């Protein structure tokens, strides 16, 4: 238990100068949430992080993680205290060099009270020393830290950071990262960006990774385990680093046959979305048992289950599409999830068409036709699905259908200009669906309010869609198209 301590120096100053309590009275605690209606306690108020430096040590045998987080930030209000989102055990916090008092609150709040209040606009350096066994910690009754037989993985959405580093856990506060992790010799540590160095000392090998472009907290990933790491450069010049657990068994070949195509697929997507926004690309396949994949920035997380039926270039296309739609251009709030999943799914449709496995229109027709009007599928509004339905099929498939409708409404020239222009318009920033609609209206010169309302914001099946002739397809093609649609998210 942590007691609040009043530093002796602060008491002496207060008794000497009346001005101090008066000015301190205008300072108030930072909000415990950043203000996202889907997740009121996620993120925090009162400061903006520019960089996280995480220097850690991990022991796979016991799942013990320890180290120091150094956070560079700037205050955005007069602050008496502020929160970080975190679950591990903290032993010391310093703000601008001075020991700060701290306590825990709510489900995942670390409340830090600096020795002296902080004025608005002050650069701050926050050092948090910590340790803990992430697999033993939970918030709201869940835990997203994935232990594996040889290590662990942090990769989930929207909650992943609480189990391994203290943060302002919301996409609105993006920052650059240095993630350096020491693991026992023979184990590897994978994270985002470029590998700056590896060094070995006293039986431990340290892997130091750098992300030099703004990155959302949930897109920051960490994996420790026994990996085979491959490096290459795409034809278009993007350096690629992939990693495969040495324990993938029967999935090993299909995993490599998919993820080794990262360079080719990054270059192919650049044709639609513009230049790849980061200085490295790649993915990793650890020996986890959960089924999803995640667009962790520059280094995509793939469950081996994504490759259980064979190679799956489609999931690689999906996760790489997110590097533009979701990672470089991030959400302003979680209700805007369609901006991520709708476009990543549409990229899979473009790939399907490229591969001759069903055109975008055939896939759109299939989604429309395969869900009758009374199917609960149509009750989920892709434009505002609610926190419990953020990753429902409707966000992905109806979401991509909405994009095909947009394409038909504005025409191919405007549509592909929008697809390529949007990631430039908001590169490394945040945006909302309303921002996207305004941008699409500007580029196309068309008023799109009714279209967006019908396809994204109505809890019912839109009527009156004239199916393309191609929707009348043979059973074998239907099966193929279903496979492309169900492919993978
Ligand atoms: N953004 C991910 C994808 O579609 C989805 C992650 C869903 N999260 C989860 N825990 N299943 O690529
Ligand atoms: Zn996705």
Image (spheres, rainbow, N blue to C red):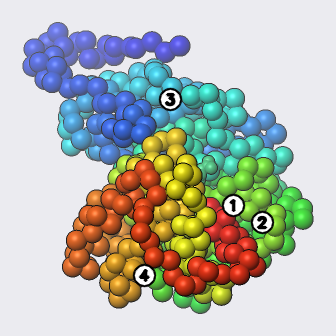
The answer to whether residue 215 shows anywhere in this view is no
Q: Which residue is mark 2?
A: 307
Dot 2 alpha-carbon crowd within 10 angstroms: few under 14, some 14 to 19, many 20 or more: many
Image: 426 above or below 91: below
The one nearer the camera, 150 or 52, is 150
Dot 3 alpha-carbon crowd within 10 angstroms: few under 14, some 14 to 19, many 20 or more: many
CB under 8 Å between discs 1 and 2? yes
Q: Which residue is mark 3?
A: 108
CB under 8 Å between discs 1 and 3? no
Q: Nearer the viewer, mark 2 or mark 4?
A: 2
Question: Residue 97 placed where, x, y %?
Answer: 38, 35
- Distance from the alpha carbon under mark 1 to that under mark 2: 9 Å
Callout 2: SS: helix
Q: Which residue is mark 4?
A: 274
Direction right: furthest residue = 250
Q: Nearer the viewer, mark 4 or mark 3?
A: 4
- Distance from the alpha carbon under mark 2 to that under mark 3: 34 Å
Please state, as top left, top right, bottom left or bottom right, where the C terminus lies in the image.
bottom right
Q: Which residue is mark 1?
A: 302
């Amino acid at each position: 238990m942590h007691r609040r301590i009043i530093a002796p120096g602060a008491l002496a100053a207060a008794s000497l100068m009346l001005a101090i309590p008066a000015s301190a009275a205008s300072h108030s605690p930072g909000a415990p949430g950043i203000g996202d209606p889907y997740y009121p306690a996620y993120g925090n108020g009162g400061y903006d992080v520019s960089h996280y430096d995480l220097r850690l040590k991990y022991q796979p045998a016991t799942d013990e993680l320890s180290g120091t987080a150094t956070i560079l930030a700037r205050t955005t209000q007069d602050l008496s205290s502020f929160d970080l989102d975190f679950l591990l055990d903290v032993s010391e916090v310093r703000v601008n060099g001075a020991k700060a008092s701290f306590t825990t609150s709510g489900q995942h709040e670390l409340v830090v009270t600096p020795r002296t209040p902080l004025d608005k606009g002050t650069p701050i350096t926050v050092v948090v020393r910590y340790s803990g066994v992430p697999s033993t910690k939970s918030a709201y009754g869940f835990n997203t830290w994935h232990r594996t037989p040889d290590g662990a993985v942090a990769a989930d959405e929207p909650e992943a950071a609480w189990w391994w580093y203290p943060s302002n856990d919301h996409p609105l506060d993006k920052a650059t990262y240095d993630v350096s992790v020491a693991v026992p010799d023979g184990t590897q540590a994978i994270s985002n960006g470029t590998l700056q160095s590896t060094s070995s000392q006293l039986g431990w090998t340290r892997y130091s990774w750098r992300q030099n472009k703004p990155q959302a907290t949930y897109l920051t990933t960490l994996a420790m385990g026994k990996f085979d790491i491959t490096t290459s450069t795409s034809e278009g010049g993007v350096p690629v680093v992939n990693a495969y657990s040495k324990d993938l068994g029967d999935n090993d070949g299909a995993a490599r046959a998919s993820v080794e195509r990262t360079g080719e697929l990054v270059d192919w997507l650049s044709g639609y979305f513009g230049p790849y926004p980061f200085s490295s690309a790649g993915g990793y396949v650890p020996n986890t048992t959960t089924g999803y994949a995640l667009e962790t920035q520059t280094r995509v997380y793939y469950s081996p289950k994504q490759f259980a039926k064979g190679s799956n270039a489609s999931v690689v296309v999906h996760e790489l599409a997110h590097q533009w739609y979701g990672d470089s251009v991030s959400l302003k709030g979680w209700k805007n999830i369609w901006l991520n999943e709708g476009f990543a799914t549409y990229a899979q449709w473009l790939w399907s068409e490229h591969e001759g496995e069903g055109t975008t229109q055939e896939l759109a027709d299939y989604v429309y036709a395969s869900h009758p009007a009374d199917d609960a599928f149509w009750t989920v509004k892709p434009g505002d699905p609610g926190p419990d339905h953020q990753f429902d099929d409707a966000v992905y498939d109806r979401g991509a259908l909405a994009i095909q409708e947009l394409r038909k409404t504005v025409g191919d020239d405007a549509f592909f200009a929008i697809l390529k222009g949007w990631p430039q318009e908001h590169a490394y920033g945040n945006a909302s669906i309303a921002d996207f609609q305004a941008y699409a209206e500007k580029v196309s010169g068309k008023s799109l309010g009714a279209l967006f309302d019908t396809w994204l914001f109505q809890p019912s099946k839109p009527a009156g869609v004239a199916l393309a002739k191609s929707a009348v397809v043979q059973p074998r093609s239907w099966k193929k198209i279903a496979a492309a649609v169900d492919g993978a998210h």
